[in-house]
Amino acid sequence: MKVEINELVERYPILQQVMLKKPVLWENPDCKREQLTFPVKGVDQDIIEDATERLRRFKPLLQELFPELNETNGEIISPLTTIPNMKEVLQNFYNTKINGSILLKRDDLLPIAGSIKARGGFHEVLAFAETLALDHQLLQSKTDDYRQLSSEKSKALFKQYHICVGSTGNLGLSIGMISSSLGFNVTVHMSQDAKKWKKELLRHHGVKVVEYQSDYSVAVEKARNESEGDPKTYFVDDENSIKLFAGYSVAARELKNQLDELGIKVDDQHHLYVYLPCGVGGGPGGITYGLKSIFGKNVSCYFAEPIHSPCMLLGLLTKLHHQISVQDFQLDNLTEADGLAVGKPSKFVGELMEDLLNGIYTISDEELLSLEYALYDNEKIFLEPSALAGMKGPVHVSATKENSGSATHIVWATGGSLVPDSMKQSLLTKGKLCIKEEK
Ligand SMILES: *Cc1c(COP(=O)(O)O)cnc(C)c1O
């Protein structure tokens, strides 16, 4: 389809700012609040229960495969922590007042994959392994001991199958690590943004890595082509996968339990705001879906995207979703936030978010790096640049919403624990410079 950019800019004036790479805040006029009902656009809440149960069945096996999961008995969960100094840092940095308290959801600490992708990625590969195991009588039923799936017999079965995926880096890490540990053959098609250390780590684990000098959409296309017509190749489709989405949605229940443990209320008087970095949309979309199913109108979810890659904003605003790309708007899709360097959003997630998402804001690389340095300097927490996108959320909300003194803001930290020390140093040095230039 041919998109008339001029017409779109006329209809949606915010696009002028977007094309000039000015950070914007967009409130979704179609977001359903009181009127929200499930299923949303045909997607039933059962997917959350189904994924929760599947991950529970696999706990013993995961614990056996990955000793680092001993602490959580095989559960893929991350801490929710306070960041006591950041509120003041943000207030000073953006010269504004923030109401309510700010918490950090540490998906950067998720085991094995070191990012939010551990949630969706593991779930999808485990679902495929489970289906194979049941079909081939390696498991008689879903109540069997799943540790049998680490046997030589199971590995011999999984070895006959091939898993492939396109990625900017982190999804590849997640899919690669879990697939190779189960014995699958696995190929990751990496976009130009993917960091060298991520490719090296995967190769070290026996994963085949194919590199492209083009962006994420091309890497996904190549992976899709590789799988076509081959019944023994399974393609993890980051642009459309309900299994990935369901895996991410489970995080909402985890968060609910953690809020309960901390005695933090979410009700008509105590609003919850959640800020999620967005690439193709599956991760933040799944979590938003899960949170809305639990908290309804008492939670507001915002996505955060780099000014160079605002694909979900373009897709949702125009409702053209994957039919348009950031390149159509003369944006280059080049950003330090490699996990968010995506030019076209997921159609499936975009359509769901029409009803669910409260808004989207964009953020510059300079802000991401400054916030990265500030978080490290004040809280001794290191995150990868993508994972800082949510940090500006409380600034936007406090500027536009009244009565949010009793609000809780959750900044979703989506990755970073596997970044090598030398890279951490160079990112922090850049961040420190950005702060100086700001001043
Ligand atoms: C992938 C990723 C995201 C966004 O997830 P999508 O499903 O692509 O929207 C955010 N942060 C990091 C660090 C990621 O790797």
Image: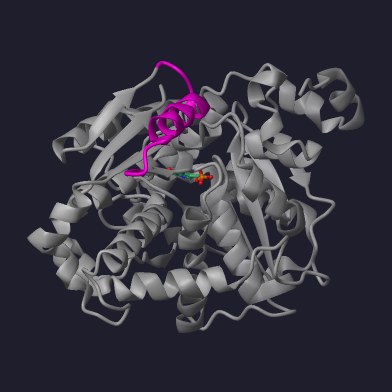
Q: Is residue 317 magenta?
A: no
Residue closest to the eye, 396 or 30: 30
Q: Give the left or right position of residue 437, taking residue 348 as reference.
A: left
Mark yes or no: residue 212 visible.
yes
> Which quadrant of the figure contains the N terminus?
top right
Q: Farthest left residue?
A: 152
> Which quadrant of the figure contains the C terminus?
top right
Q: Quadrant of residue 405?
A: bottom right
Residue closest to the eye, 211 or 26: 211
Instruction: Give the residues in magenta.
Output: 213-233
Q: Give the left or right position of residue 30, taking residue 46 as reference.
A: right
Q: Residue at x 55, y 79 (%)?
A: 264
Q: Position of residue 418 (x, y in %)?
A: 27, 44
Q: Position of residue 57 (x, y in %)?
A: 31, 75
Q: Is residue 66 above or below residue 4?
A: below
Q: Residue at x 60, y 42 (%)?
A: 346
Residue closest to the eye, 135 or 165: 135
Residue closest to the eye, 232 or 166: 232
Instruction: Count the marks.
Output: 0
Q: Is residue 225 magenta?
A: yes
Q: Give the left or right position of residue 352, taking residue 208 as reference.
A: right
Q: Quadrant of residue 344?
A: top right
Q: Residue at x 30, y 78 (%)?
A: 141
Q: Position of residue 349 (x, y in %)?
A: 63, 49
Describe the colour scheme in one phrase.
one colour
